[in-house]
Amino acid sequence: MNAATIACSAATHPGAVRPRNEDQVVSRPEIGLWAVADGAGGHGGGEQASAAIAAALESIPPGLTAAEMLAQVRLRIGGVHAALQSRAAARGPDAIMASTLVVLLLRGGHFAALWAGDSRLYLWRGGAMHRVTRDHSLVQEMVEAGQLREEEAELHPQANVITRAVGQPGAMALDKVADRVLPGDCFLLCSDGLFKALEEGSIAAMLASGAEAPDFITAALDRRARDNVSVALVRV
């Protein structure tokens, strides 16, 4: 798989309510890497956290093997995690500089997804949409424990509580899923601002229609998206 077999688009927007955009999108088709990071933390902490992640991924050099690329992502995000913790500690005991992250790697007919938090990766394949990632969030834990229905999760008052993020206190690990890539696959990376504004059925319908990243932003804004909205779309 090379850049000639891939079409991609990316877009980000502050949303219809928030004055500041704390999301970051990375699109590097030349090395087969895409990412969305959604910052969290007061006084610009989230904006700085997502920017640090983006800078780390943007600086990965070309020419790496698939194994080296995976190792570089983990190594660099681990470094960002430690640096953000140190910067937050210097601000005070209650300061937080953190960000969710979802990364897509494509190489040699396979893909790998790595993530922490509730930014998601969806896969459109064979006329159906599948959620590849599992949210690291309080409401996801409640759904899995049978305390909350899936359709209630996005409207729950604690829907914004994430249980894992880059830069959060304590240790951090990126979950990983890997599989083959098939012709016609379409990958959608997004921050929670998208799926909190659009139901998954609407997202699937847009993927089926061939929508590009800016179309998803427009649809979320039409729904008065209350959070920053970021999308990276990769079609094989």
Image (tube, grey):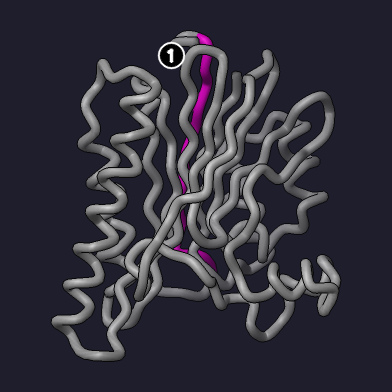
Residue at the farthest bottom position: 93
Please indicate whether residue 158 sits to the left or right of residue 202 in the image.
left
Q: Is residue 133 above or below residue 193?
A: above
- Region in magenta: 5-16
Q: Is residue 186 above or below residue 110?
A: below
| Quarter containing the C terminus | top right
Residue at the farthest front position: 171
Q: Is residue 208 magenta?
A: no
Query: What is the tally of numbered marks visible in this picture?
Result: 1
Q: Quadrant of residue 152?
A: bottom right
**Residue 155 pos. (x, y %):** 73, 77
Label 1 residue SS: helix
Please indicate whether residue 81 sits to the left or right of residue 174 in the image.
left
Residue pointed to by mark 1? 3
Q: Is residue 205 above or below residue 162?
A: above
**Residue 121 pos. (x, y %):** 60, 44
Q: Residues within 10 Å of mark 1 (few under 14, many from 20)?
A: some
- Residue found 55% across the figure and 50% down from its top: 190
Q: Nearer the viewer, residue 149 or 19?
A: 149
Please indicate whether residue 146 sits to the left or right of residue 163 in the image.
right
User: Is residue 21 at all visible to an observer of this figure?
Assistant: no
- Residue found 48% across the figure and 57% down from its top: 116
Q: Is residue 144 above or below residue 42?
A: above
User: Is residue 73 at all visible to an observer of this figure?
Assistant: yes
- Residue found 47% across the figure and 18% down from its top: 107
- Residue found 70% across the figure and 18% down from its top: 184
**Residue 123 pos. (x, y %):** 68, 35
**Residue 79 pos. (x, y %):** 23, 53
Q: Quadrant of residue 124?
A: top right
Q: Nearer the viewer, residue 116 or 2?
A: 116
| Amino acid at dot 1 | Ala
Q: Nearer the viewer, residue 62 or 77?
A: 77
